[in-house]
Amino acid sequence: AKCSQNGTFSKGELQRFGPIELNPSSGVLNYGQGLFEGLKAYRKDDGFILLFRPEENALRMMMGAERMCMPSPSVEQFVDSVKLTVLANKRWVPPVGKGSLYIRPLLMGSGAVLGLAPAPEYTFLIFVSPVGNYFKEGLAPINLIVENDFHRATPGGTGGIKTIGNYASVLKAQSIAKAKGYSDVLYLDSTYKKYLEEVSSCNVFVVKDKVISTPAIKGTILPGITRKSIIDVARSRGFQVEERLVSVEELLDADEVFCTGTAVVVSPVGSITYLGRRVEYGNKGVGLVSQQLYSALTGLQMGLTEDEMGWTVK
Ligand code: PMP
């Protein structure tokens, strides 16, 4: 059964960044009817600005909108609005090698509702902000704690889409982990507390005997665009990549672990702590597979290597 609402988005306009007006009884403020996306624009040395697979973000927003009973902009509207916003903010795209422009599209129920129901009106907006490279001096490993008490998503819930409520549910676990010195939390499935799901804002991969494995997408894990791209890049380089259930034991026994996401790109994991046990990975936590895939993906995203996949958009 589908609950997607039909509706057209009228052409918007560029506005200076600042507070927006929102009805106190809007669907987004009261019932969390909101979705977001995240992507980056990189400057190339020939002056062109590159987007990485923006139509994938548009499709993920459409999928999420269906789950949240919201109408969504078409792929074309989404990509055109992203391009328009980036062009209007061209001067904020950092110089080559100095970072990127982070792009945050938001879709929300802005119409008023009092009883629990989808909102009668929706707003789509995009804001941008320059961001530095996640790793200032080459790749640096992150330290994760595996969470046994908090879960990010449950079967039948909204874990597979980029709805704002998913991020509300991780704030506490993430704050506790950070206060203890960890970079972030790795979540397990909520049924068996045994299988890996993902980190608060990135997907996870384990490498054992050169075979790369990542949890299969099954409704409780966000289908990351970086994840999907890394799977293709790794396969094109001859690696065997498996999408399946990956247990926490396999994580602890891995040769190498890394995370993928728009913010972290490919981020090696230096250590994992699970129920008081800490495992450190070899090569000072920066595995060779992570390094190789990081170079391959950033080469494409920054326009340093030829885009054989046809993934970048000017
Ligand atoms: N999982 C979660 C929960 C996320 O928020 C993100 C960031 N969008 C990812 C994974 C990675 O997705 P992507 O590669 O599309 O950025």
Image (spheres, rainbow, N blue to C red):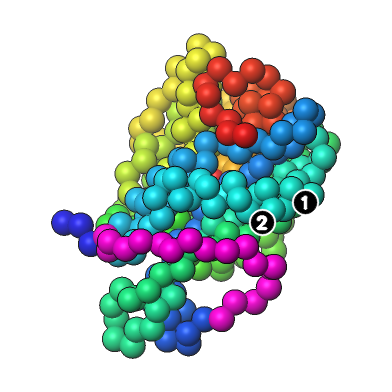
Query: Mark 2 vs mark 1: which is more N-terminal?
Result: 1
| Residue 198 image position (x, y, % from top left) | 48, 46
Residue 145, above or below 290: below
Task: Identify which residue is drawn at 35% across, 50% down.
Answer: 63
Report if the CB atoms under discs 2 and 1 are less than 8 Å apart: yes
Q: Is residue 223 above or below residue 153?
A: above
Q: Residue 113: percent from the left, percent from the top?
A: 34, 84
Callout 1: SS: helix
First to last magenta residue range: 4-21
* Residue 44 seen: yes
Q: Position of residue 287 (x, y in %)?
A: 66, 26
Q: Amino acid at mark 2?
A: Val
Badge 2 marks a residue whose secondary structure is: strand
Which quadrant is the N terminus positioned in?
bottom left
Query: Circle 2 is placed at which residue position?
Result: 128
- Between 292 and 244, the one lying in front of the other is 292
Q: Main secondary structure of the magenta part?
A: loop
Q: Is residue 274 visible?
A: no
State the residue in front, 42 or 9.
9
Tell whether position 288 is magenta.
Answer: no
For this rendering, which residue is in front, 81 or 290?
Answer: 81
Is disc 2 surrounded by few (<14), some (14 to 19) or many (20+) residues within 10 Å? Answer: many
- Label 1: few (<14), some or many (≥20) within 10 Å? some
What amino acid type should be assigned to the residue bearing mark 1? Trp
Which label was assigned to residue 92?
1
Of all residues shown, which one is farthest toward the left? 1
